[in-house]
Amino acid sequence: MSYIIDRRLNGKHKSTVNRQRFLERYRRHIREAVNDAVGRRSITDMEQGERISIPRKDMSEPSFHHGGGGRRNVVHPGNKEFQQGDRIKKPAGGQGGAGGQQAGDSGEGEDEFAFEIDQREFLNFLFEDLALPNLVKRHLQGTRSFQRRHGGIVSHGLPAKINIVRSMRQASMRRRALSAASRKRLRTLQAERDELLNQDQSPERHQRLAELEEQIARLRRRLERIPFLDEVDLRYNHHVKVPTPVSRAVMFCIMDVSGSMNQDMKDLAKRFFLLLYLFLQRNYEHTEVVFIRHHTSAKEVTEEEFFYSRETGGTIVSSALKLTLDIIKQRYPVDEWNLYAAQASDGDNWNDDSPSCAQLLEKELLPRLQHFSYVEVMPRSHQALWEQYQQIQDRHGDSFAMAQLDDPGDIYPVFRRLFKKRMEAA
């Protein structure tokens, strides 16, 4: 059995494999640090690396040492201060001088081990075990996605792709084809020679035996000159690129920017959508994102407008849902795309618009969507929109989810709960 050991060095001349083992061992501490980082960071710093601190007590490892029993008098080599039999005074401070710590009359603690994780490692821990729910619809993307598959055996190729079995089989067939006539002739001559050896002595017999031996030797030399493996015998594995079905998805990000949404609420909503945007970019190559902002009217905007525009107004939530439905009908066929939507709002809505939102969502959008997520940010008290959506969740729990955000520390736990990888998606 052969083993391949990866001893490549990373940028700081440390083993990449050992670093992965280290990260796996202290996964719990890293996950907690990543969770805290999401809550305290600004929007622009969301995808940077992070400094992780691990308490010294969690770094302890088992070790073998001599037991405390018995009497032992040892003077280690190189000691110039003590002789055997000397008594050592108790160090000042009562705990020994190890560790370089100063004595104090209160408090306790242990040193911490700190290290850095880069942007890639931070995002890996951030989006671990997360997935879009119900991602099943597939469609051929043409030349955008390919998979290399075995395409047969060819006579020319790279040495790394040589097929040993087929090459040896081809060499065996070539040797048999080239030597068949010679071997048949050789067997005939050997049989005639054996027959002559059993006959009586005669000049003709002796001359014929000499001729047979010469012919047999010539045939054997001819057979030996046939190479065991020739260049024409070499066969190579051939691989071809074929288009593969890929899951295409589109995410509708719907954010309420009405006057009832204060700056803290908008910041919470933006943090949630930025986390969602990073998740889609990190985990799904063929995923599009549609940004929709709404107050009394809804508008499809760019990424920059979505996160940084200051436009505001009244509140009619149904305008955003209607725009979402129109965009689906115009650009995203339901039989080809996995459709998702995430909505963030404070729940404040025009008087009679919440029932219209519920009806539009349940009758028109949910039959087309794979999943719909609703996040209510810092509500003073749940209003009509939450109550209407609560009824939809009771009836469509597999394709609809809702949660509440009170402060930045809730964003990551809520996000993980909404997009936790389900068993059927694993």
Image (cartoon, rainbow, N blue to C red):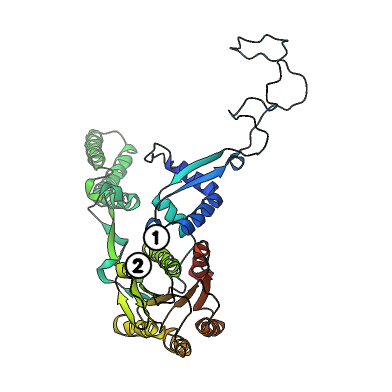
Would residue 1 be seen by someone viewing this image from the given angle?
no
Whether tag 2 and tag 1 are in contact, CB under 8 A, the answer is yes
For label 2, the SS is helix
Q: Quadrant of residue 98?
A: top right
Query: What amino acid type should be assigned to the residue bearing mark 2?
Result: Phe
> Left or right: 212 with respect to 83?
left
* Relative depth, front residue between 138 and 282: 282
Which residue is painted at 34% across and 73% down in the image? 291
For label 1, the SS is helix
Query: What amino acid type should be assigned to the residue bearing mark 1?
Result: Ile
* Relative depth, front residue between 70 and 356: 356
Which residue corresponds to mark 1? 43
Residue 421 image offset from top left, x and y in percent:
50, 67
* Relative depth, front residue between 48 and 167: 48
| 225 relative to 42, above or below | above
> Left or right: 158 with respect to 257?
left
Which residue corresponds to mark 2? 307
Which residue is painted at 51% across and 52% down in the image? 33
| 106 relative to 160, above or below | above
